[in-house]
Amino acid sequence: MRRPSPLPPAPGSPSGAPRGADERGEGSGSARVHDAEVVPLPLPSAAEPAATAPDADLGLRDVWRASRARRRALRAEVRRFTVRQRRRRRMWIGVGIAFVVMVLGTAGAAYSPLFAVERVEVVGTTQLDAAAVADALSGQVGTPLALVDDSAVKAALVRFPLVESYTLEARPPHDLVVRVVERTPVGVIETPAGFTLVDAAGVVLSTTPTAPGGQPVIEVADGTDSDAFRAVGRVVRALPDGIRAQVTGVSASTPDDVTLTLGATGTRVVWGSADRSVEKARVLDLLMQKSPPDRTREYDVTSPEAGVIR
Protein backbone atom coordinates (compact mmCIF):
# COMPACT_ATOMS: atom_id res chain seq x y z
CA MET A 1 0.00 0.00 0.00
CA ARG A 2 1.42 3.41 -0.98
CA ARG A 3 1.18 6.62 0.97
CA PRO A 4 -0.45 9.50 -0.80
CA SER A 5 1.94 12.27 -1.91
CA PRO A 6 1.85 15.49 0.20
CA LEU A 7 2.22 17.56 -2.99
CA PRO A 8 -0.85 18.71 -4.87
CA PRO A 9 -1.59 16.83 -8.07
CA ALA A 10 -0.16 18.27 -11.26
CA PRO A 11 -2.59 19.91 -13.67
CA GLY A 12 -4.12 17.56 -16.23
CA SER A 13 -3.67 14.51 -14.15
CA PRO A 14 -6.46 12.68 -12.42
CA SER A 15 -6.92 13.99 -8.93
CA GLY A 16 -6.93 10.54 -7.50
CA ALA A 17 -3.80 9.28 -9.21
CA PRO A 18 -0.68 9.51 -7.17
CA ARG A 19 1.83 12.00 -8.61
CA GLY A 20 4.74 9.90 -7.74
CA ALA A 21 3.54 6.99 -9.74
CA ASP A 22 3.06 9.14 -12.85
CA GLU A 23 6.48 10.76 -12.53
CA ARG A 24 8.20 7.48 -12.10
CA GLY A 25 6.08 5.97 -14.88
CA GLU A 26 4.95 3.13 -12.89
CA GLY A 27 3.15 0.62 -15.05
CA SER A 28 4.96 1.71 -18.22
CA GLY A 29 8.32 1.17 -19.69
CA SER A 30 9.48 4.85 -19.99
CA ALA A 31 9.69 7.72 -17.52
CA ARG A 32 7.60 10.90 -18.03
CA VAL A 33 8.61 14.35 -16.75
CA HIS A 34 6.05 17.20 -16.35
CA ASP A 35 7.19 20.82 -16.48
CA ALA A 36 5.71 23.29 -13.98
CA GLU A 37 3.54 26.00 -15.42
CA VAL A 38 5.35 29.36 -15.81
CA VAL A 39 3.30 32.27 -14.56
CA PRO A 40 4.57 35.61 -15.97
CA LEU A 41 5.18 38.52 -13.45
CA PRO A 42 3.32 41.71 -14.07
CA LEU A 43 5.56 44.47 -15.46
CA PRO A 44 5.02 48.11 -14.59
CA SER A 45 3.21 50.04 -17.23
CA ALA A 46 4.82 53.05 -18.81
CA ALA A 47 1.84 55.16 -17.82
CA GLU A 48 2.09 54.11 -14.16
CA PRO A 49 4.35 56.57 -12.18
CA ALA A 50 7.28 55.10 -10.34
CA ALA A 51 7.17 55.10 -6.52
CA THR A 52 9.03 58.11 -5.08
CA ALA A 53 11.60 57.89 -2.23
CA PRO A 54 10.51 59.28 1.17
CA ASP A 55 13.32 61.94 1.23
CA ALA A 56 12.69 63.16 -2.28
CA ASP A 57 10.36 65.92 -1.04
CA LEU A 58 13.03 67.43 1.43
CA GLY A 59 14.38 70.77 0.26
CA LEU A 60 17.42 72.92 1.15
CA ARG A 61 15.37 74.93 3.65
CA ASP A 62 14.38 71.76 5.52
CA VAL A 63 17.99 70.65 5.70
CA TRP A 64 19.03 74.09 6.99
CA ARG A 65 16.31 74.04 9.62
CA ALA A 66 17.30 70.58 10.78
CA SER A 67 20.95 71.61 10.99
CA ARG A 68 20.06 74.72 12.98
CA ALA A 69 17.90 72.71 15.35
CA ARG A 70 20.72 70.25 15.84
CA ARG A 71 23.21 73.03 16.60
CA ARG A 72 20.76 74.62 19.02
CA ALA A 73 20.28 71.33 20.83
CA LEU A 74 24.05 70.83 20.99
CA ARG A 75 24.56 74.29 22.43
CA ALA A 76 21.88 73.64 25.03
CA GLU A 77 23.64 70.46 26.09
CA VAL A 78 26.99 72.21 26.29
CA ARG A 79 25.47 74.98 28.44
CA ARG A 80 23.85 72.43 30.69
CA PHE A 81 27.09 70.57 31.32
CA THR A 82 29.23 73.73 31.75
CA VAL A 83 26.91 75.77 33.96
CA ARG A 84 29.18 75.40 37.03
CA GLN A 85 32.28 76.36 35.11
CA ARG A 86 30.55 79.42 33.68
CA ARG A 87 29.34 80.40 37.15
CA ARG A 88 32.88 80.22 38.53
CA ARG A 89 34.19 82.21 35.59
CA ARG A 90 31.61 84.93 36.18
CA MET A 91 32.49 85.00 39.88
CA TRP A 92 36.23 85.45 39.21
CA ILE A 93 35.55 88.09 36.59
CA GLY A 94 33.40 89.95 39.12
CA VAL A 95 36.14 89.72 41.78
CA GLY A 96 38.75 90.99 39.32
CA ILE A 97 36.59 93.93 38.28
CA ALA A 98 35.91 94.81 41.92
CA PHE A 99 39.65 94.67 42.73
CA VAL A 100 40.57 96.90 39.80
CA VAL A 101 37.87 99.39 40.75
CA MET A 102 39.09 99.42 44.36
CA VAL A 103 42.73 99.98 43.34
CA LEU A 104 41.85 102.72 40.91
CA GLY A 105 39.57 104.38 43.44
CA THR A 106 42.21 104.22 46.19
CA ALA A 107 44.93 105.57 43.92
CA GLY A 108 42.67 108.33 42.68
CA ALA A 109 41.74 109.35 46.20
CA ALA A 110 45.36 109.19 47.44
CA TYR A 111 46.60 111.49 44.69
CA SER A 112 43.68 113.86 44.96
CA PRO A 113 43.36 117.02 47.13
CA LEU A 114 41.16 114.99 49.48
CA PHE A 115 44.38 113.76 51.15
CA ALA A 116 46.47 116.93 50.91
CA VAL A 117 48.88 117.96 53.67
CA GLU A 118 47.37 120.48 56.04
CA ARG A 119 49.64 120.08 59.09
CA VAL A 120 53.34 119.20 59.54
CA GLU A 121 54.24 117.66 62.89
CA VAL A 122 57.88 117.36 63.99
CA VAL A 123 58.73 114.83 66.73
CA GLY A 124 61.97 113.67 68.37
CA THR A 125 63.59 117.06 68.92
CA THR A 126 65.24 118.09 72.18
CA GLN A 127 67.82 120.68 71.13
CA LEU A 128 66.08 121.79 67.94
CA ASP A 129 63.08 124.08 67.79
CA ALA A 130 60.28 121.87 66.44
CA ALA A 131 58.27 124.88 65.33
CA ALA A 132 61.19 126.19 63.28
CA VAL A 133 61.59 122.81 61.59
CA ALA A 134 57.85 122.62 60.82
CA ASP A 135 57.94 126.14 59.39
CA ALA A 136 60.82 125.14 57.10
CA LEU A 137 58.62 122.33 55.75
CA SER A 138 55.57 124.53 55.17
CA GLY A 139 56.13 124.27 51.41
CA GLN A 140 54.64 120.77 51.54
CA VAL A 141 51.27 122.05 52.76
CA GLY A 142 48.64 121.51 50.07
CA THR A 143 50.56 118.63 48.47
CA PRO A 144 48.82 115.22 48.39
CA LEU A 145 50.39 112.89 50.94
CA ALA A 146 51.41 110.44 48.22
CA LEU A 147 53.23 113.20 46.32
CA VAL A 148 55.32 114.68 49.15
CA ASP A 149 58.74 115.50 47.66
CA ASP A 150 61.39 113.77 49.78
CA SER A 151 64.20 115.71 48.11
CA ALA A 152 62.49 119.00 49.00
CA VAL A 153 62.16 117.84 52.62
CA LYS A 154 65.83 116.89 52.70
CA ALA A 155 66.85 120.27 51.28
CA ALA A 156 64.82 122.02 53.99
CA LEU A 157 66.32 119.96 56.83
CA VAL A 158 69.91 120.42 55.65
CA ARG A 159 69.75 123.90 57.19
CA PHE A 160 69.59 122.26 60.64
CA PRO A 161 73.00 120.71 61.45
CA LEU A 162 71.61 118.94 64.52
CA VAL A 163 69.44 116.71 62.31
CA GLU A 164 71.29 113.42 61.89
CA SER A 165 68.48 111.52 60.18
CA TYR A 166 64.74 111.71 59.69
CA THR A 167 61.77 109.67 58.51
CA LEU A 168 58.46 110.77 56.98
CA GLU A 169 55.15 109.30 58.07
CA ALA A 170 51.84 110.07 56.37
CA ARG A 171 48.80 110.09 58.61
CA PRO A 172 45.71 110.40 56.45
CA PRO A 173 43.83 112.42 55.79
CA HIS A 174 45.95 115.58 56.29
CA ASP A 175 48.94 115.06 58.66
CA LEU A 176 52.62 114.68 57.71
CA VAL A 177 54.80 113.52 60.63
CA VAL A 178 58.56 114.12 60.50
CA ARG A 179 60.53 112.00 62.99
CA VAL A 180 63.92 113.56 63.63
CA VAL A 181 67.00 111.93 65.15
CA GLU A 182 69.31 114.64 66.48
CA ARG A 183 73.06 114.51 66.49
CA THR A 184 74.65 113.94 69.88
CA PRO A 185 77.42 116.44 70.61
CA VAL A 186 80.56 114.97 72.19
CA GLY A 187 82.34 118.23 73.04
CA VAL A 188 83.80 121.46 71.75
CA ILE A 189 87.02 122.15 69.94
CA GLU A 190 88.77 125.48 70.42
CA THR A 191 89.38 127.25 67.13
CA PRO A 192 90.37 130.79 66.10
CA ALA A 193 86.66 131.53 65.57
CA GLY A 194 85.73 130.40 69.08
CA PHE A 195 84.48 127.10 70.46
CA THR A 196 82.96 124.73 67.88
CA LEU A 197 80.47 122.13 69.04
CA VAL A 198 80.92 118.82 67.19
CA ASP A 199 79.38 115.37 67.23
CA ALA A 200 81.14 111.99 67.10
CA ALA A 201 81.43 112.21 63.30
CA GLY A 202 83.11 115.65 63.48
CA VAL A 203 80.07 117.47 62.09
CA VAL A 204 80.04 121.09 63.23
CA LEU A 205 76.83 121.84 65.10
CA SER A 206 77.49 125.39 66.24
CA THR A 207 80.25 127.87 67.02
CA THR A 208 80.23 130.23 69.99
CA PRO A 209 82.80 132.72 71.29
CA THR A 210 82.84 131.00 74.70
CA ALA A 211 82.76 127.36 75.68
CA PRO A 212 79.12 126.17 76.19
CA GLY A 213 78.34 124.70 79.57
CA GLY A 214 78.07 120.97 79.98
CA GLN A 215 80.36 120.17 77.04
CA PRO A 216 83.96 118.93 77.51
CA VAL A 217 86.82 120.59 75.67
CA ILE A 218 88.42 118.12 73.24
CA GLU A 219 92.13 118.20 72.50
CA VAL A 220 93.23 115.79 69.79
CA ALA A 221 96.07 115.62 67.28
CA ASP A 222 95.29 116.12 63.59
CA GLY A 223 91.77 117.50 64.12
CA THR A 224 88.37 115.88 63.64
CA ASP A 225 89.49 113.73 60.70
CA SER A 226 91.97 111.73 62.78
CA ASP A 227 91.60 108.28 64.34
CA ALA A 228 92.26 109.85 67.74
CA PHE A 229 89.14 112.03 67.41
CA ARG A 230 87.00 109.05 66.37
CA ALA A 231 88.21 107.15 69.46
CA VAL A 232 87.29 110.15 71.65
CA GLY A 233 83.80 110.23 70.12
CA ARG A 234 83.23 106.55 70.86
CA VAL A 235 84.42 106.94 74.47
CA VAL A 236 82.26 109.99 75.22
CA ARG A 237 79.13 108.38 73.75
CA ALA A 238 79.68 105.27 75.91
CA LEU A 239 79.77 107.26 79.18
CA PRO A 240 76.70 107.12 81.48
CA ASP A 241 74.93 110.44 81.98
CA GLY A 242 76.15 110.71 85.57
CA ILE A 243 79.81 110.47 84.56
CA ARG A 244 79.33 112.39 81.32
CA ALA A 245 78.14 115.44 83.25
CA GLN A 246 81.40 115.49 85.28
CA VAL A 247 83.76 115.33 82.30
CA THR A 248 85.29 118.75 81.53
CA GLY A 249 88.03 117.72 79.14
CA VAL A 250 89.07 114.88 76.81
CA SER A 251 92.47 114.48 75.20
CA ALA A 252 94.11 111.93 72.91
CA SER A 253 97.25 111.90 70.80
CA THR A 254 96.58 108.39 69.42
CA PRO A 255 93.52 106.13 69.36
CA ASP A 256 94.98 104.15 72.30
CA ASP A 257 95.61 106.89 74.89
CA VAL A 258 92.29 108.60 75.52
CA THR A 259 92.28 110.50 78.81
CA LEU A 260 89.37 112.20 80.60
CA THR A 261 89.42 115.10 83.05
CA LEU A 262 86.76 115.20 85.76
CA GLY A 263 85.31 118.35 87.35
CA ALA A 264 87.06 121.13 89.14
CA THR A 265 89.40 118.70 90.92
CA GLY A 266 91.11 117.85 87.69
CA THR A 267 91.04 114.12 88.42
CA ARG A 268 92.32 112.12 85.45
CA VAL A 269 90.82 108.97 84.01
CA VAL A 270 93.25 106.88 81.99
CA TRP A 271 90.95 105.20 79.51
CA GLY A 272 93.25 103.80 76.87
CA SER A 273 91.62 102.70 73.60
CA ALA A 274 87.91 102.90 72.75
CA ASP A 275 87.57 99.09 72.84
CA ARG A 276 85.29 97.69 75.54
CA SER A 277 84.19 101.19 76.45
CA VAL A 278 80.90 100.00 77.95
CA GLU A 279 82.74 97.70 80.39
CA LYS A 280 85.26 100.43 81.23
CA ALA A 281 82.43 102.87 81.98
CA ARG A 282 80.84 100.37 84.37
CA VAL A 283 84.18 99.79 86.16
CA LEU A 284 84.79 103.56 86.40
CA ASP A 285 81.38 104.06 88.01
CA LEU A 286 82.20 101.43 90.66
CA LEU A 287 85.61 103.02 91.34
CA MET A 288 84.07 106.48 91.70
CA GLN A 289 81.56 105.13 94.20
CA LYS A 290 84.34 103.56 96.19
CA SER A 291 86.60 106.62 96.02
CA PRO A 292 85.02 109.95 94.95
CA PRO A 293 87.00 112.23 92.60
CA ASP A 294 87.68 114.80 95.29
CA ARG A 295 89.75 112.18 97.14
CA THR A 296 91.32 110.58 94.08
CA ARG A 297 94.04 111.81 91.78
CA GLU A 298 93.62 109.23 88.99
CA TYR A 299 91.48 106.32 87.86
CA ASP A 300 92.95 103.73 85.49
CA VAL A 301 90.45 101.59 83.58
CA THR A 302 92.74 100.60 80.73
CA SER A 303 92.08 96.99 81.73
CA PRO A 304 88.44 96.54 82.82
CA GLU A 305 89.35 93.37 84.75
CA ALA A 306 91.58 95.36 87.13
CA GLY A 307 90.61 98.98 87.74
CA VAL A 308 93.21 101.06 89.59
CA ILE A 309 92.75 104.03 91.91
CA ARG A 310 95.72 106.33 92.50
Image (cartoon, rainbow, N blue to C red):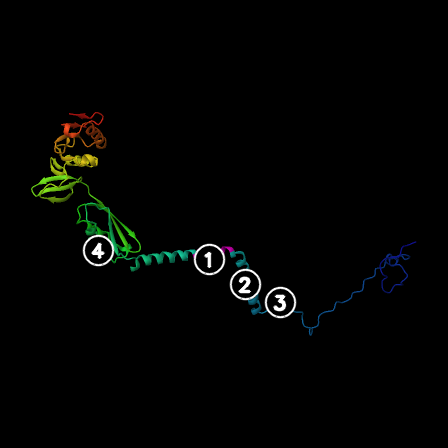
* Residue underneath mark 4: 138
Which quarter of the image is occupied by the C terminus? top left
Identify the image quadrant of residue 56: bottom right
Which mark is on residue 90?
1
Prevailing SS of the magenta stretch? helix
Closer to the observer: label 3 or label 1?
1
Q: Secondary structure at mark 1?
A: helix
List the single residue furthest toward the right: 1
As helix, strand or loop, the secondary structure at mark 4 comes to helix
As helix, strand or loop, the secondary structure at mark 3 comes to: helix
Q: Residues within 10 Å of mark 1 (few under 14, many from 20)?
A: few
> Crowding at label 2, few (<14), some or many (≥20) Cα neighbours within 10 Å?
few
Check disc 3 and report the residue beneath it. 55
What kind of residue is marked 1? Arg
Which kind of residue does numbered mark 2 sit on?
Answer: Arg
Residue 169 located left or right of residue 79: left
**Was residue 56 drawn as part of the magenta stretch in this picture?**
no
Q: Nearer the viewer, residue 151 or 216?
A: 216
What is the distance, in whole Å, between disc 4 and disc 2 at their CAs? 71 Å
Mark 2 and mark 3 lie on one chain; the one further toward the N terminus is 3
> Which contiguous range is marked in magenta?
84-94
**Circle 4: is it few (<14), some (14-19), or many (20+) Cα within 10 Å?**
some
